[in-house]
Amino acid sequence: MEAIEEKIDLESDEELPFSSSQGTKKSQSFQFETSHIASHTKASNSWVFKKILISPLRSTYFVLKAKINVLLPFGPLAILLHYLTGKQEWVFFFSLLGIAPLAERLGYATEQLAFYTGPTVGGLLNATFGNATEMIISIHALKYGMIRVVQQSLLGSILSNMLLVLGCAFFTGGIKHQKVQVFNKAAAMVNSGLLLMAVMGIMFPAVLHFTHTEVHFGKSELSLSRFSSVVMLVAYASYLFFQLKSQPNLYSVIDEEIETNGEDSEEEEAPEITLMEAVGWLAILTVWVSVLSGYLVDAIQGASDSLNMPVAFISVILLPIVGNAAEHASAIMFAMKNKLDITIGVAIGSSTQIAMFVIPFCVVVGWFMGQRMDLNFQLFETATLFITVLVVAFMLQEGTSNYFKGLMLVLCYFIVAASFFVHVDKSADDD
């Protein structure tokens, strides 16, 4: 019995040194791991701090690196002139210059955000923010009750995109390549059909008004406009579904053209800023455009009086130049690169957005604001839109373009501009 106890004591004595050395090794390894984790935590904290500090600077560089941003100081200058002087023509002119780069950067931020949202949501974003400048200016004008300015500025955006932007793109592309350029005729004709539907929606309230065939004078025209606007919004939503989900092969030519550019196109398609940065810049740019739009709309009548220029000319010709600056530059660039499908998508697609989305949207917004915004654009404006859509549809039906077609479209725009310069809008006084 004693022998057994001694054996147990010996075994326990022999195991003590071993257990103590093992504990020492474990404590040393624990201290090493603790110091390693601490150093790793410090490194990660410094990395996060650098990322938080550098990321906004990086996104600011990408957003502000465009050359058109040299016009940004004209925005604050317009606000200063509004409060320091009574010269509305300078406020109007500098507000135009200040909004131009913001409109272009809004398009950039929307494109960056579309990288993270997928094609369906990206299409909705492009529909919403692609013409955000026109929408913001229109909503500000609606608040002041300037319904004719809203109608004429949106009409001017359609005319500018279809005649001036597309014409310049066809002309420069034809001059550079010295050949007939080809584009996807099917996609172009779908847009032409939507534009003709928009003409139908705008024409009937005007015809109803000027033929004095309303059931309830002054009410039937407004009710028809609101009903037609809802139908046009449904049609545009169906068009987005048709384009992005149901029949994407109709637009496969554009996708194939983008994919065949090689490594350069892959670099262009990579997002330059993060999702949250894109959302943040979209909010900042939208607010700044909204602020400048208020001063711009407020100065329209004063600029018209001081410059002895019709409000119709300012609304139809000058205001759309600001909103279409980005489309104008990109359409010409793609035409010179022989990418006519993208050019058609930019110019005609933007016109379709305004005709089928922005104009009906403004009617609905005016409905909720208590403003009598309708689709009666008056006979002169409606006839101008109808002839323009027909001319462009005939130009696109062959699926080819050259510099002569572009020259004809630009010359047609000069005729339209001259017509509105000598046009007196009698209904503007009523509004």
Image (tube, rainbow, N blue to C red):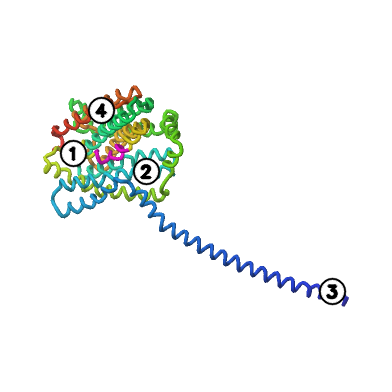
Q: Badge 4 local density, few (<14 within 10 Å), some, or many (20+)? A: many
Task: Please name the predominant secondary structure of the magenta segment in the image.
Answer: helix
Asked if residue 309 is among those painted magenta in the image, a careful observer would answer no
Q: Secondary structure at mark 3?
A: helix
Badge nearest the viewer, 4 or 2:
4
Q: Secondary structure at mark 2?
A: helix
Label 3 close to label 1 by CB (< 8 Å) = no
The amino acid type, in three-letter code, at marker 1 is: Ile
Mark 4 and mark 2 lie on one chain; the one further toward the N terminus is 2
Mark 3 and mark 4 lie on one chain; the one further toward the N terminus is 3
Label 3 close to label 4 by CB (< 8 Å) = no
Q: Position of residue 310 (x, y in %)?
A: 14, 37
Q: In the picture, residue 354 is in which quadrant?
A: top left
Q: Position of residue 99 (x, y in %)?
A: 26, 46
Q: Which residues are magenta?
A: 320-329
Alpha carbons under labels 1 and 2: distance apart = 28 Å
The amino acid type, in three-letter code, at marker 4 is: Leu
Residue toward you, 213 or 92: 92
Residue 205 visible in the shown view: no
Q: Badge 3 local density, few (<14 within 10 Å), some, or many (20+)? A: few
Disc sitting over residue 7 in the figure: 3
Q: Which residue is mark 1?
A: 314
Alpha carbons under labels 3 and 2: distance apart = 82 Å
Q: Secondary structure at mark 4?
A: helix
Disc sitting over residue 110 in the figure: 2
Q: Position of residue 371 (x, y in %)?
A: 23, 41
Q: Secondary structure at mark 1?
A: helix
217 left or right of 389? left
Location of the N terminus (image quadrant): bottom right
Residue toward you, 234 or 301: 301
Badge nearest the viewer, 1 or 4:
4
